[in-house]
Image (cartoon, grey):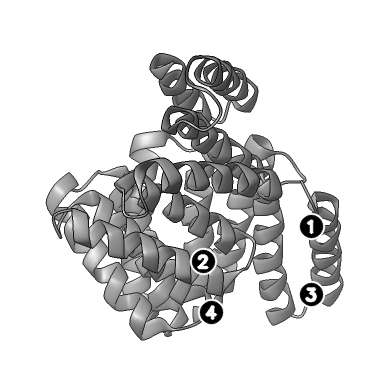
Amino acid sequence: MRSLTLLGGLALDRVQFGEAETLHRRALAIREKVYGPDHPEVAVSLSALGALERDRGHFAAAERLYRRALDIREQKLGPEHPEVASTMQSLSGLRLHQRQYLEAEALAQGALAIREKKLEPDSDAVAAALNVLANAYLRQKRYAEAESLSARAVTIREKLGGADHRALAASLDTHAEILTGQGRYAEAEAYGKRALAIVERGRGPSHPRRAVMLTTLATNYRDWGRHPEAEALYERALDIRQRALGAEHPLVADTLEAQAVLLRKTGRESEAAAGEARVRAIRAALEGK
């Protein structure tokens, strides 16, 4: 079971959704047969499947899986168990994708409280919880609160993982977004470029994680007034996401939406309107999935 889950996670990291689903569902079936439907081992597979559905862009399906895992873990392990915090953190990140920012904030605060109570303050698990909560504040434009948390996460991860740690890239990217939101474009560019370089070295030029960092840099350049550079980066991010995730994925819609802002800034109203129409169509098609 553990081997199936590990292999499924590796397949998901390679964006091989079909293989990942097969492996995770096999593991889930075995766990349910051996342990019953409400065992913490079952929650392991439910969480893995939740991550798969999240990455596919099927947010409603991911939410159902995460909530079932959370319910099992709270009942069987207790409300302050680290695995409860892990599931709350995953659900918080998902709710951010669903634009449910207040619930995402509450879940992230709960996860961080558990982590800080149970773990060393400079652990990577604490840094991960800080990063999720920083993102919740960022989406609400609460930049000062977000910056304090993300700076702490960056510091922890720099100490733990060195210059090429994947988790560090996520924290650097969040920090870059926060700085961009405050108009601190040169600082944001430096953090964004560091994050992009880590991902390119670790995952290659075509991985969807690279598109995350490209989009962050593009938005920085867009708001900074460096429009040609922004446009080139948005196009690269859009190409990566469409090839890896499909043309109807919500992250494709997110990139199109950000790109449409640039198109309006540069007076290309008809192109912006076409992009926005496509965003609406993608999101409408994904309702309930």
Q: Earlier in the sequence, mark 1 or mark 2?
A: 2
Residue corresponding to mark 2: 104
| Foreground pick, 131 / 263 | 131
Residue 268 bears which disc, if any? 3
> Label 2 sits on what residue type?
Ala
Residue 283 bears which disc, if any? 1
The x and y percentages for residue 102 are: 54, 74
| Mark 4 Cα-neighbour bin, 10 Å: few <14, some 14–19, many ≥20 | some
Q: Earlier in the sequence, mark 4 or mark 1?
A: 4
Residue corresponding to mark 4: 223
Q: Earlier in the sequence, mark 3 or mark 2?
A: 2
Q: Nearer the viewer, mark 1 or mark 2?
A: 2
The x and y percentages for residue 269 are: 82, 77
| Residue drawn at x 63%, y 36% as measured from the top left | 244
Is residue 225 shown to the viewer in this render?
no
Q: Earlier in the sequence, mark 3 or mark 4?
A: 4
